[in-house]
Amino acid sequence: MTGTLFINGRIQALEPTGLSEKEADAVYVENGRIRAIGRTAELKLQLAGRAVRTVDWEGAVVLPGLTDSHMHLSMHGMKLAMLDFSGVTSKEEMLRLVRERAAVTPPGEWILGLNWDENRFVPAAAPTLEELDAVSTRHPIFLTRTCFHAYLANSEAFRRAGITPDTPDPEAGAYGRDEEGRFTGWVYEEASVPFTRAQPEPDYAAKKDAIRRAWLDALRLGLTAAHTEDLRFLGSIETMQRICRELREEGIAFRTHQLLYYPFLEEAEELGVRAGDGDDWLRIGAVKLFADGAIGGRTALLKQPY
């Protein structure tokens, strides 16, 4: 196979090359692997007579591929289509963004957002149920906190989820209530399940699009691989494997280390899938399970009260 010689780069290598940073300006790649790093003139001499394609980096900085050690590509792909509150500094700004989305969203469709952190707001207060209802009663609104252990919902979302004031808290979660037992809009841990189940189930194409968006955005940011857990969104190990294979066939060069969420262990056993299985592009990792909550959303069990 024809190799590619990349020249005129400012190369930051992890392994010793025997050359200074300014001296190493070229990389030779063959069959998808780096075969040599060195000076342009020397590599051209070594490759003389071969059919080699040359690419000029035009002085760009070249880094080794970066790997994210803990993320959820599916959530990132979904986030790119949702409201993102990560840069919001007040509940008023947060409500404004929700109001703007409601103005362009057909009545009845869900308005979803994530990455809000009331501890960074001035003052440190999250929107209330009444304030979310004031934004819209025609759209179910469901907003995920930055920790993914606590949420906010409006009355229409509670109605769609089938949650009434008489609904008891689940064993591993709770619905926020005031002193008189009325909902505050807060939803904690597994109490979020009825809300997510009430949302339309994405079909295969939508799931694949979410992963594609995530892969392309990760590559744009300089990531070439990630450790990820996506089975809660994708629904099965077979779907995960199929999507990864098809996206690779589309030419998207991104590597994934896939963690197995523990409810899918039975499917893993049926498929004969074990930790360490896979290839250079998709590798099966460890089993993921939850033993507790999160500090930020105040769902973790502590010895002393918050």
Image (tube, helix red, strand yellow):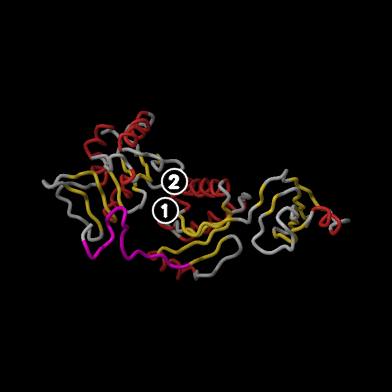
**Picture quarter containing residue 106?**
top left
- Residue 248, given in percent of the width and then of the height, sits at 60, 53
The residue depicted at 26 percent of the width and 63 percent of the height is 301
Q: Mark 1 and mark 2 in contact (Cβ < 8 Å)?
A: yes
Q: Is residue 193 left or right of residue 34?
A: left
Which of 305/150 is in front? 305
**Which residue is tagged 2?**
78
Residues shaded magenta:
286-304
Q: Vertical placement of 288 versus 233: above or below?
A: below
The residue depicted at 26 percent of the width and 42 percent of the height is 125
The three-letter code of the residue at mark 2 reads Met
- Numbered tag placed on residue 233 in the rendering: 1
Assess disc 2: are there few (<14), some (14-19) or many (≥20) residues with their C-alpha within 10 Å of its C-alpha: many
The residue depicted at 48 percent of the width and 52 percent of the height is 73
The three-letter code of the residue at mark 1 reads Phe
Q: Is residue 52 left or right of residue 21?
A: right
**Picture quarter containing residue 12?**
bottom right
